Amino acid sequence: MADELDELIDFLSNSSPQVRGAAADIVRGLTGDSDGLRSLAARADRALPALLRLLASVGAGGAGEAAADSLVNLSQDGDLAARLVVLGAVAAAMDVMVKRGGEQPKLARSLVMLLVNLTQVGDEKVQGLYVAKLVRSFCRSSCDSEDEDIFEHIASILVNISKVEAGRRILMEPKRGLLKQIIGQFDSTNQLRKKGVAGTIRNCCFEADTQIQNLLSIAEYLWPALLLPVAGKKIYSEEDRSKMPPELANALSHEREAVDDSEIRERALEAIYMIVMQDDGRKAFWSVNGPRILQVGYEDEEDLKVMGAYELIGSLLVGKGEIEQDQEQGEDKPQ
């Protein structure tokens, strides 16, 4: 069996397209079985490069799709994913997705899943060019049917990328405008996209202490993405709305469907907390009537964990608000 498997791996590099295709199909079948995965993992030094070469081959066709599926299954193993990153699999997958993803939607979906696994490795060598291409693909509507949204899983890739500092720097670079583009996808009805956007924003807000001005430069898009999910379903009074910018006031002038996913609400509140920890962020939050929105949203909240996130912000605002009020009163006193 060992000799047969070694021979099968050799066939992945055969000069005949038919032989390569047949071998790739067999390997794909093996990766769907735990015993097959173990056997291929033991030969990773030969199997992984062969599959990557087949993936990158221009005329690979169905063999390329089989290679991509095999790599998705193999990369679920953290050690193999790390080895694939070293072999340049991220760049290879991105190149193939950009060049052939539009013509081969099944291949594109597999490549996105491969990148989800590879970006979990936490490699700091994130390429700005590849991140920009990912965001472009993510923001491109592949089709009207959610069932065929081949780029929805890029949401998970962006969350993974934003977990590392190098990734956050790229996403938040003002000239690239990537975070602004990502936030635009929060209006999607696709829950995976919405959750990915919320998680990416939240992770980027870990840089709020040094990037607060960059975050506030896109406030017109940022506040609706963070505040509307936690605003509850009630119609806000005209008085409340008069203290908000149009992008919030208009949305809160009528009843809305609640964001059912508690993780999205929690991520939004965590992001808000990190923003209001900064003086400028807190002032901006007050300027859009953020505290009132959280007060109303809290009244509708039933999830205990999410309620705790509301309360954490409330505690911060009460303490900081008293300090700011004292400072303003002090400034008004004659010297």
Image (tube, rainbow, N blue to C red):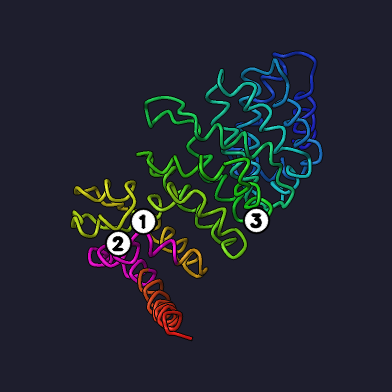
Q: Position of residue 58 (x, y in %)?
A: 71, 17
Q: Quick check: 104 left or right of 266?
A: right
Residue pointed to by mark 1: 227
Q: Position of residue 334 (x, y in %)?
A: 44, 85
Q: Quadrant of residue 135?
A: top right
Of the pair 51 and 145, the residue shown nearer to us: 145
Q: Quick check: 115 left or right of 155?
A: right
User: Magenta residues?
Assistant: 283-309
Closer to the N terminus: mark 2 or mark 1?
1
Q: CA distance from mark 3 to mark 1?
A: 25 Å
Residue drawn at x 69%, y 36% is: 129
Q: Quick check: 147 left or right of 57?
A: left
Of the pair 140 and 82, the residue shown nearer to us: 140
**Residue 310's disc number:** none
Closer to the N terminus: mark 3 or mark 1?
3
Under mark 1, the amino acid is Leu
Residue pointed to by mark 2: 293
Q: Residues within 10 Å of mark 3 (few under 14, many from 20)?
A: some
Under mark 2, the amino acid is Ile
- Contact check, label 2 and label 1, Cβ < 8 Å: yes
Q: CA distance from mark 2 to mark 1?
A: 7 Å
